[in-house]
Image (cartoon, coloured by chain):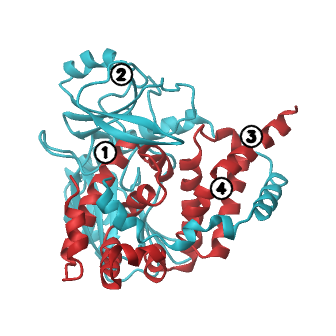
Chain colours: A red, B cyan
Amino acid sequence: MSRQAGDKEAFERIHRQTFDRLAAYVLARADRDVAADAIARTYEIAWRRRAELPREPIGWLIGTARRVLADGRRSERRRDALVERIARTSSTSAEDHLGSLARRDSAVRALSRLTHNQREALLLIAWEGLSEKQASAALGCSRGAFALRVHRARKAFRRELERGETDDVAPVRAAATKEAT
Amino acid sequence: MTDSLTSVLESLRPCEAAMSAEIFPASRREQMLAEICAGAEPRRPVVRARRRLLPAAALAATALGLAVLLLVAGLPGAGTQRASSAIAFRTAADGDVIATVEEPFAAQSQLERAFARRGFDIQVSLVPVSPSLVGTLVYASEEDGADSIQPLLRGPCLAGGAGCSVGVRILSSFKGRGYITLGRAARADEAYDSTASAFAPGEPLHCSGLLGARVGSALPRLERDRLRAQWREEVSVGSSSRSRTLSAPPSGSYIWEATLSTPDKLVVFTEPTPWPADARHGAHDNDGC
């Protein structure tokens, strides 16, 4: 087998193994058309740089997709696109879980008060299911720095949930305060 | 992360995130893949040797900046000069302002005055950071949360927060008040607000040879340096992996990463498998040793 053919086969395997996770990351943060472009662009970059891909490439791919999306948003001059998207879309089970729209809105508000980096750290774990190692690769920081960031983000999120307390929020707060620091 | 907060966050996940199979059916994926593979040729790998020199070069530049600052500070009438040059401003073609902190050790008030002269209401604060991050930008934000102050990232970097940035891009849409946080040296008992890899140039384990070493062989060195370690291990769960904190050092495991949380407290990340010293592994440095 030629080197080119071997490269292609290996890349196809990576594409197959990572597509759903990468697509989930992008679709959670962008509309379908933008997501399709961002996914294509991410794999295009990965193909060009396939010699540099780590053995476990999902963190690298998500980090690349993150930058691709950020580049697009920079030109749009939009406010925090992720929070806007969460605010207007949610899974059906969200309202089942939180019990009411008011509680969901409180959680969105709490999330919106975190810094961009804190939100990303929390969501890479909660939404994408990345390990600390994968997530630190996605954010381009050391694992230690990522662990510290997640720790502080959790505390900040819990604090913001408490701050935004209303009668409707109480069950959410109760759930959140169970968490060990 | 424990289940309670995670479930709150999971409930906020937009439903389309779970619809990749419907939105991108197999035929569309194959088409996307074919277009990509028919496209550009692979780029040559980045020359790591150059990248490895960057943190050291940045530290040297910072040290030089400090030396110049101290020299200038001793001259009559130097105060005005220092204040005016603490931050360099440049306007980009798209109207954004690029602000580079020229003197990271300038007083907080001098930095704020430099922004004010340019017409920006930006407050500067200083937080304790691990040694290699002293003088770098840790965090930038603004009152309305619009993300219109963005760190200028300078290539691959071993830090958290805003990376190894020493400047910000202030978008033309910025208005109101902004906040910038710079790293300062920590007191002996103080927790760091931002940390780099303990193996990065300027950090205590740089050139220690402990990156990739077995935990058991690292213990004497940590004891000698009076570093208290918290041990964490990455364990595989199916195709994914999770971290857990250990109550005792896993002597047979290997050190994959470490970072200081205070000047004498180290968080060490271990794995049962050897650290791939030849891997393009990202932010690890025993380089230049």
Residue in front for this viewpoint, A5 or B17: B17
> Where's residue A175, x and y in %?
24, 65
Specify whether disc 1 shares its chain with disc 4. no
Whether discs 2 and 1 lie on one chain: the answer is yes
Q: Amino acid at mark 1?
A: Thr
Describe the element under mark 1 as helix, strand or loop: loop
Q: Nearer the viewer, mark 4 or mark 2?
A: 4
Give the residue drawn at x 68%, y 70%: B23
Name the disc covering residue B208, or none. 2
Q: Rate crowding at label 1 as few (under 14), some (14 to 19) or many (20 or more) other CA atoms within 10 Å.
A: many
Q: Amino acid at mark 2?
A: Ser
Estimate the spatial distance between the alpha carbons at disc 2 and disc 1, rounded to whole Å: 18 Å
For the residues labelled 4 and 2, the Cα–Cα distance comes to 39 Å
Mark 2 secondary-structure assignment: loop
**Which mark is in front, 1 or 4?**
4
| Sequence-wise first label, 3 or 4 | 3
Label 4 packing within 10 angstroms: few (<14), some (14-19), many (20+): many
Specify whether residue B93 is in view: no
Q: Which label number is shown at residue A19?
A: 4
Whether residue B30 sits left or right of residue B210 in the image: it is: right
Letter of the chain that mark 3 sits on in the rendering: A
The image quarter in which residue B39 lies: bottom right
Task: Indicate the quadrant containing the C terminus of chain B: top left, top right, bottom left or bottom right.
Answer: top left
* Secondary element at tag 4: helix
Chain bearing tag 2 is B
Residue located beneath label 1 in the image: B195
Q: Compared with residue B43, is residue B114 higher up or lower down, i.e. above or below?
A: below
Q: Amino acid at mark 4?
A: Phe
N-terminal of the pair, mark 2 or mark 1, is: 1
Q: CA distance from mark 1 to mark 3?
A: 36 Å
Which of the labelled discs sits on residue A10, or is there none? 3
Instruction: Give the residue type that dot 3 points to.
Output: Ala
